[in-house]
Amino acid sequence: MKRFVIDTDTGVDDAEALLMAFGHPDVTIEAIVSVAGNVGVDKTTPNVLKVLDAVGRDVPVYRGCDRALVFRKPNAEDAHGSDGLGDAGIPESARTIEAEHGVDALVRLANEHPGELTLVALGPLTNVALATRLDPDLPNKYRELVIMGGAVYAMGNTETRSAEFNIFYDPDAAHIVFSEWLNITMLSWEATAENPLTLEQTNTLSAISTPRGEFFHKITRAQIAMIRNFLGVETLFIPDPLAMAVAIEPERVITRSERHYVQLELSGYSTRGQTVVDWRDRLGKTANTTIVISVDMQRVYELMRQGLE
């Protein structure tokens, strides 16, 4: 049984990833921590509760940081809607969140269960960075840190062009994490762009007549239309479900990966937030990141379908 703590800026694909995790019989979600990113934390937090309503599960939810460490950045409402869930009109939940701050929860959980928990970070790394500063030994207390983030070939999806959104939103936090953690697994934006769901697969998932399937259908409609209008393709990008699939079944999902040293670019006008990979291991530094290069998309699709049935 895998035990996850999930840190998320709950937008459309984050919600899809949560559905996948809740649908897997060998995964226990110990806690969910919100963070600002796709939309503000005042929306990402209640969005977690909406997912819990859809799956009918009770998990402690903690509100995390409401901004990046240094500079405020625009969110991704253009992709996720003003509410973060595709403006689908999902009703507000009657559930409540825990009083403890999300950063404190990350530290406490690691100390209560050293070596037992996997931390899955689906949004900016603000909470993880602050937790690492509070407890410098935190990287040794989580079994692994799996993140959706980074552009390992500098083919990003932000205004700098070379950075991926989650890292670009708070590159200073990412710098702390990549400087201190040695057990990172990273699913990059390039891997996301190369592994979308087809329209046929998306339609099949949307047609599943369960509360989870209906939830998926509602939150993805606007995003599919956005991708069609802006990119002219009939597909659905699923960055966070890909990262979640890697966390759940790495031995089945990952078909190729490489382990290298990754560091953050913080000062470049056109490169701030770029994840720079030492592909040739020229620096002689200890590798800190397993970079997922290719995945078994059929298995990812099966995991998504399992999460909706």
Image (cartoon, rainbow, N blue to C red):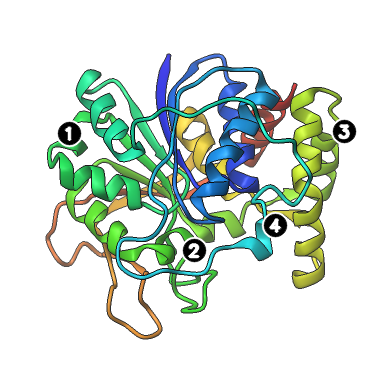
Q: Nearer the viewer, residue 254 or 134?
A: 134
Residue for point 86% across, 25% down: 209
Q: Quadrant of residue 207?
A: top right
Question: Callout 4, which amino acid?
Answer: Gly
270 in relation to 101, above or below:
below
Q: Quadrant of residue 157?
A: bottom right
Residue for point 49% across, 56% down: 37
Which residue is label 2 attached to?
A: 165
Q: Distance of mark 3 from mark 4, alpha carbons?
A: 22 Å
Question: Callout 3, which amino acid?
Answer: Ala
Q: Earlier in the sequence, mark 3 or mark 4?
A: 4
Q: Nearer the viewer, residue 153 or 67?
A: 67
Q: Nearer the viewer, residue 302 or 93?
A: 93
For residue 51, side relative to residue 3 (left or right): right
Q: Earlier in the sequence, mark 1 or mark 2?
A: 1
Which residue is label 3 attached to?
A: 207
Which residue is label 4 attached to?
A: 81
